[in-house]
Image: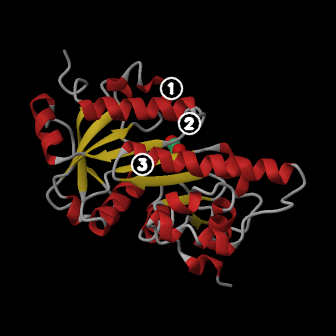
Amino acid sequence: MNGVLDQKIVKYFIDTCHQSWLKGWNERNGGNMSYRMKPEEAEAVKPFLSEDGVWRPITLTLPNLSNEYFIVTGSGKYYKNVLREPENNICIIRVDEKGENYKIVWGLAEGGVPTSELPTHLLNHSIKKEKTDGAYRVIMHAHPANTVALTFLLSLDDKTFTKAIWEMITECPIVFPAGIGVVPWMVCGSADIAVATGEKIKKYDAVVWSHHGIFCCGPDFDTAFGLMDTIEKAAEILIKVMSCGGKRQSISKEQILALSEPYHVDIDAAMFDD
Ligand code: 2HA
Ligand code: ZN
């Protein structure tokens, strides 16, 4: 028996990686995911963790993540393999007292380090933890094809992207009423892209990385995964519409904003300002 792999939350993490792989969002080693464990979930795995690992710098100082435990995918590891060999492809890390270093306390049994996008994950966890009073726990990054394709076709700004995606499925403005952020192309894995994504994640739950992929976050796996799924589905519809010669009719700004009241959401009308 492996005490860590028996935990419901770890099984959910593994299953979400596999669902993402089945969606085709994670070619080769593409994409990464992290989950900030609840105190009781961390307590439950503690007997099975090792403190023998070395401390490594996060490259950012994140005091509100002090002593937090995260489940994280491994750098260079393939989502395809997570379900079959979880202990070699994911890990649990602990952040130190100051929020400056982390240590692997379980997993990556055949060696390795957490995702190359760890700075973006941890900075964005820090921001969302503060903004949502601790409710948000999941951050996932992947390379869904239609969303990436749109970054070659649409202007790379929040309003253009948000309006274009909202318009494709009536549920979209209800699912992400604040909209979607867009960051320009940047070197991935860097502190700079972490900070640029962090600025957008203060406002949005989804941030598109131009010519690369998307980051989605939420309180749990289903919400974050559902957000990515909804955006990618809408992007697929838009690509099909564009491929067929473009829109001949659509829904209006007034129709989109009319969804706020019955669905008890605050659809950001400023997205339609010039
Ligand atoms: O490793 O997707 O952005 C995977 C990535 C980096
Ligand atoms: Zn990526």
Q: Which mark identifies residue 223?
A: 3
Q: Residue at x 83, y 59 (%)?
A: 247
Mark 1 crowdedness (10 Å alpha carbons): few <14, some 14-19, many ≥20:
many
- Occupied quadrant, residue 33: top left
What residue type is disc 3 on? Answer: Thr
Instruction: Tell me the residue at 42%/26% (across/down).
Output: 82
Q: Nearer the viewer, residue 227 or 168?
A: 168
98 is higher (above) or lower (below) than 37: below
Contact (Cβ within 8 Å) of mark 2 with mark 1: yes
- Residue type beneath disc 1: Lys
Amino acid at circle 2:
Asn
Position in image of residue 270 (x %, y %): 58, 81
The residue singled out by tag 1 in the image is: 80
Residue annotated with mark 2: 26
Task: Name the quadrant containing residue 251.
Answer: bottom right
Residue 78 seen in this snapshot: no
Task: Please tell me whether mark 2 sits on a helix, a strand or a loop.
Answer: loop
Q: Are circles 2 and 3 on residues that touch, CB within 8 Å?
A: no
Question: Left or right: 36 with respect to 259?
Answer: left
